[in-house]
Amino acid sequence: MKTFLALVFLSFKFCNVFAEAPPQGQLSVEGKKLLGNGKPVALHGMSLFQSNFEEGIPFYDEQVVKALECQWNSNVVRAAMGIDDGAEAYLQGPEPEKTQKGRVEKVIKAAIDAGIYVIVDWHTHNALNQEVKELKVYQQKIVDAIRAIDPENLILIGTPTYSQGVDTASKNKLTGKNICYALHFYAGSHKEDVRKKAKDALDNLGVDERLTPSGSLVKKHLLGQDNGVKCDGSSTGSTSPASTSPTSNGPK
């Protein structure tokens, strides 16, 4: 499960040399909706594969982020900082820029330069089998720590069962503003049962969700989306064939 995902507010631009003021503006949550400049918005973009896996490492690159903006029409990119799965700790590496933290920081800077939003994903599965009440205690402490240094930006909260338990999490919500719950699914394998969880969560007042990938439910409720993963194609959730280059063109 993805325990925490923090959405960093960045400026948005088209393929210009200098960043412009973002059309969406500062993002916020009101009731069930994600707002930008006080109006409902939906983010759309791609997720990078885990930063500590061979399939994903080449894509933690400035040119990839630029291509996602200019060729894939993305206004958000997700950087999944690998934490476990047998890989090295996120601060370890031969040099700072080759640590997991360094790779993610490279994507963050590239997103700032490209003028798009970026989601920083603390990509760990350790809390997979924990109950919502147990997770809430931990998550609330993290939210409070983030708010001590960042009072406004969105915080995306993971839920049990690989971030599919939004229905139960929405009944025991965290305290604070601009908080969203993440629903993670693959369109080819996760079907009506997961869609029902999303609908049940949306029926609970004050819950906003980010959904990945897109679909009719997303469009109906104007929810944000990250469409699959950007890697070399080894992942079953990848949008790219195995021969994909980090600088390949986007979909036609």
Image: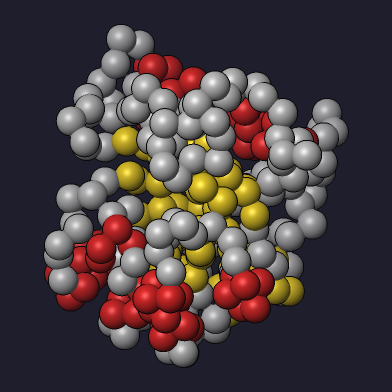
User: What residue lies at 14% left-to-right and 65% top-to-bottom?
Assistant: 130
Query: Quick check: 171 left or right of 221?
Result: left
Q: In the image, residue 188 lies at what x, y percent?
A: 46, 57
Determine if residue 173 is in view.
no
Query: Quick check: 205 left or right of 218?
Result: left
Q: In the image, residue 115 lies at what x, y percent?
A: 71, 40
Determine if residue 16 is in view.
yes
The quadrant in which the C terminus is found is: top right
User: What residue lies at 23% left-to-right and 49% top-to-bottom?
Assistant: 125
Display colour scheme? secondary structure
Image: 122 above or below 206 = above
Q: Find residue 24 and report its image quarter.
A: bottom right
Looking at this view, is 198 or 78 the one in front?
198
Please count the marks in the image. Answer: 0
Image: 30 above or below 89 = below
Query: Quick check: 121 left or right of 88?
Result: right
Image: 43 above or below 55 = below
User: What residue lies at 72% left-to-right and 28% top-to-bottom?
Assistant: 249
Looking at this view, is 38 or 48 the one in front?
48
The quadrant in which the N terminus is found is: bottom left
Q: Find residue 142 and report its image quarter.
A: bottom left
Residue sitting at the far top: 94
Q: In the image, residue 31 lies at what x, y percent?
A: 54, 83
Q: In the image, residue 13 lies at what x, y percent?
A: 79, 43
User: What residue lies at 55% left-to-right and 41% top-to-bottom?
Assistant: 239
Query: Quick check: 132 left or right of 229?
Result: left
